[in-house]
Amino acid sequence: MSDSFQALTPASTSPPVAIAVGSVGLVQTQFHDFDQPLPLMSGQSLPSYTLAVHTYGQLNADRSNAVLVCHALNASHHVAGISAENPDDLGWWDNMVGPGKPVDTDMFFVIGVNNLGSCFGSTGPASINPATNRPWGAAFPVLTVEDWVMAQARLADKLGIERFAAVMGGSLGGMQALSWSIACPERVANCVVIASTPRLSAQNIAFNEVARRAIITDPEFHGGDYYAHDVVPKRGLAVARMVGHITYLSDSDMAEKFGRTQRSPAADGDYHYGFDVEFEVESYLRYQGEKFSRYFDANTYLIITRALDYFDPGRQTDGDLTQALAAAKANFLLVSFSTDWRFPPPRSREIVKALLNNEASVSYAEIDAPHGHDAFLLTDPRYHAVVRAYFERIAKGIKHD
């Protein structure tokens, strides 16, 4: 990325915001309203809903260069660039998406959609339930990855996009990309699944349950209807984030960042005999947890982690992933990371094997990186080279205006 900067001033911002050359720049959120009820996998439905969206680049004349980027648990539609609403907010995948970047917005029209149930602009538990004129709270419907795909497909219809050049995502976003290839095979030319899995292990479900219990048992949770009490279950949210964050990092990465460093060793030895922050890793986790509790919604956390737990394409085929993926017609790129113990490489290889059993076109890269699950968000040159090469190949088959 270039180190050059240009200054732009959004209407709501003063002084000017410094934007790196190579960035998509300032991005304004678009809101798309849908009045037709959305049937859900649970048997429930949403009577109406809104999706918050960012777009980057230009849609070409035949609408063949669109790329849908699906987000992970605590991310949003803000994939790249600087939010016009909050100039301090840089897109969570800004190193991946932009002019000259691996997903080049000079060639592709990139769409980021905030999932239903989230807390960053799309309809979620904090939104008003039209039946009660109060926030949905705990009454918000159960959601699945497949429900998100159906909502995203309706957005694509509204934008006139019949087929995506690619659907991509990391972690939970990769599950959505995989689900797209099964549910809408004619609408996906390429499916890019990064640091993901065909289903959660029992250990992963267990981590999610510990996090959920931290929230549910917070006295300020009030059965999910804390909005009416004008409180937030911050302690539970903070602990949930701490638990999750531990799973995103590798042991070696944590050792390198923090080791056993103590912030202020006791004058008389190594022991404080107390429970305040003492080790650097404790300070880091508490900081991450407390920050998270200030901007994320507790009900959203419960809904999305349950969607993670439920995801299993093989559920309808007696666990046969090959059969579950038989309908897919896309070309595939899968990427995993050696130290990702949350969604380790064998889980990606399981998807690759099932696709090969179906004689699908598959590219697979296993990156030796020390950063654990979070590696998919970082700028590893080998990882980015793989994604860049794959998208350059996609671009060759697209008509450019």
Image (cartoon, rainbow, N blue to C red):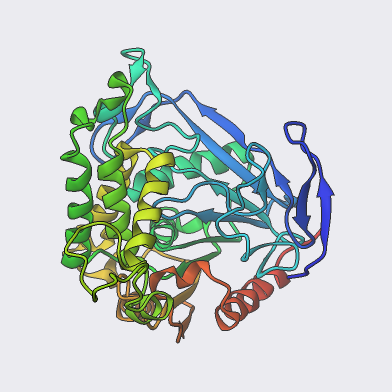
| Relative image position of residue 131 (x, y in whole percent) | 32, 14
Residue shown at 53%/70% (left/top)?
Answer: 378
Residue occupying the far front of the picture: 268
Q: How many marks?
A: 0
**Looking at the image, residue 19 lies above or below residue 126:** below
Return the x and y of residue 322 as percentages of the image width and height. 29, 72
Question: Residue visible at 50% across and 39% down?
Answer: 154
Answer yes or no: is residue 326 visible: no
Q: At x 31% / y 63%, what residue is drawn?
A: 282
Query: From the viewer's perspective, is residue 126 above or below residue 311?
Result: above
| Spot occupied by residue 118 in the image (x, y as percentages of width and height) | 41, 40
Between residue 33 and residue 251, name the one nearer to us.
251
Q: Position of residue 43 (x, y in %)?
A: 23, 35
- For the question of whether residue 273 can be seen, the reply is yes
Question: Would you identify the image quadrant in which residue 266 lies?
Answer: bottom left
Q: Quadrant of the N terminus?
A: bottom right
Out of 136 and 4, give the one closest to the viewer: 4
Does residue 55 appear to the left or right of 280 in the view shown?
right
- Looking at this view, is 132 or 390 the one in front? 132
In the image, residue 120 sits, relative to residue 272, either above or below, namely above
Quadrant containing the C terminus is bottom right
Q: Quadrant of residue 67?
A: bottom right
Residue appearing at x 27%, y 51% in the figure:
240
Residue 393 appears left or right of 140: right
Q: Quick one: which residue is furthest to the bottom in this view? A: 368
